[in-house]
Amino acid sequence: TRVLLPCNGPMKCHSSGRPGSARIFGKDVVTQGPEIRRDIGYLPSEVFYYEGMKVRDLLKYSASFYEGDCTQRMNELSEIMELELNRRISDLSYGNKKKVGIIQGLAHEPKLIILDEPNSALNERETQRLFAVLRSLREREDFPPFHLSPLSRLTTNDS
């Protein structure tokens, strides 16, 4: 989570008091933050949503912040993750709410995906489906081959 803070604006380094800088995709996170965020998919460790909305409406709303139509990708991901789009958020288990967050983070086909404990509320089958989606992203030319533990199952040596 601390890695993402500079993307939201200037930050003072409390340990040394000296200013610093950060770049993502070669762009300065302070001056070009909004442009950078368009190319990032993010799933926080905890997800909270408008309980009265339907999943489809929430995903459409989220997609409206990005260029292009994400509808087809949202439908594909919801099918893979076995998430019913016509259900109300309030009727979902925490695991299904986590799936909503996964779809939100991936639907606009970002260049960089940051997932904070993506499988914390998923069962083994759902986790396998998530990892299959993430492995398929590795095949994209513009997708960086980077991962953090405990997602070591996504390395090129996985079975």
Image (tube, rainbow, N blue to C red):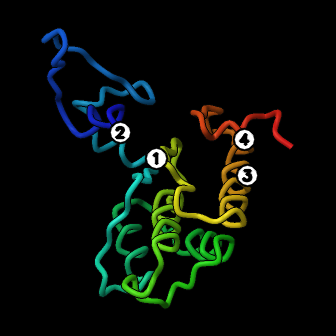
Q: Amino acid at mark 2?
A: Thr
Q: Which residue is mark 1?
A: 116
The N terminus lies in which quarter of the figure?
Answer: top left
Tell me where residue 126 sits by quadrant.
bottom right
Q: Would you call the spot at circle 2 few (<14 residues within 10 Å), some (14-19), or many (20 or more)?
A: few
In the rendered structure, the answer to whether residue 14 lies left or right of residue 130 reads: left
Image vertical order of residue 96 relative to residue 36, above or below? below
x, y percent for residue 10: 17, 29
How far is mark 3 from mark 1, CA to CA? 19 Å
Q: Which residue is mark 4?
A: 153
| Mark toward the start of the polypeptide (4 vs 2) | 2
How far is mark 3 from mark 4, CA to CA? 13 Å
**Element under label 1?**
loop
Q: Which residue is mark 3?
A: 136
| Mark toward the start of the polypeptide (3 vs 2) | 2
Question: CB under 8 Å between callouts 3 and 2?
Answer: no
Q: Would you call the spot at circle 4 few (<14 residues within 10 Å), some (14-19), or many (20 or more)?
A: few
**Element under label 3?**
helix
| Mark toward the start of the polypeptide (3 vs 1) | 1
